[in-house]
Amino acid sequence: MKHYSIHAIDMFTRHVLGDTPGSNWLVENNYHELIAVIDAVRDDKKAFKFLINGKHFELAAFVNAIWEDEKAFQFLIKHKAFDWAASANMICGDDKAEAALERAGKNHYVMMANAIQKRIRDDGDRAVSPMGVIKNMLDFKKALKKGEDE
């Protein structure tokens, strides 16, 4: 998995909150996959496909783990994407995940998770249908199977 600096995560957080300079920084520095994450969380199928096609499987799993997909969460753990797994759990309301990130000095992930959670609440989940979530899970499973075949 690609390593993301504290600054990159901070710019992603700003993007999630609608900050134009944060969004511009992500584009200018080729972090298109981070832009796709929040779009995929909001049920943009093209964004989710972008993550899969770009082999950003951990980020795709993060998107699904936010919607409490246990297999996606286990995928994150198996691939040692612990900060992303803890962030997904935090978004799902796990206070222990937040405390663990804070103890590890990963406050930038705490801020990111809070921003994503706020964005989901602000959207009122209107952009995310249950059928969309199920389809993303199926697409993720297909991508994993395809990845194992390669």
Image (tube, rainbow, N blue to C red):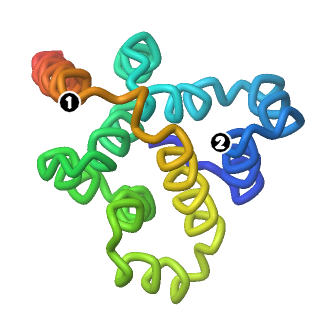
For residue 137, say whether it is visible. Answer: yes
For residue 148, say whether it is visible. Answer: no
Q: Position of residue 117 (x, y in %)?
A: 49, 55
Considering only order in the chain, which callout, 2 or 1, is on the residue closer to the N terminus? 2
- Provide the secondary structure element on which disc 2 rests: helix
Q: Which residue is mark 1?
A: 130
Mark 1: amino acid = Pro
Q: CA distance from mark 1 to mark 2?
A: 22 Å
Mark 2: amino acid = Val
Q: Is residue 118 left or right of residue 84?
A: right
Residue at the image point whose x is 63% and y is 24% from the top: 32
- Provide the secondary structure element on which disc 1 rests: helix
Q: Which residue is mark 2?
A: 16
The N terminus, quarter of image: top left
Q: Is residue 88 left or right of residue 12?
A: left
Q: Nearer the viewer, mark 1 or mark 2?
A: 1
> Mark 1, residues whose alpha carbon is within 10 Å: few (<14), some, or many (≥20)?
few
Q: Position of residue 116 (x, y in %)?
A: 53, 50
Q: Position of residue 75 (x, y in %)?
A: 21, 48
- Image label count: 2
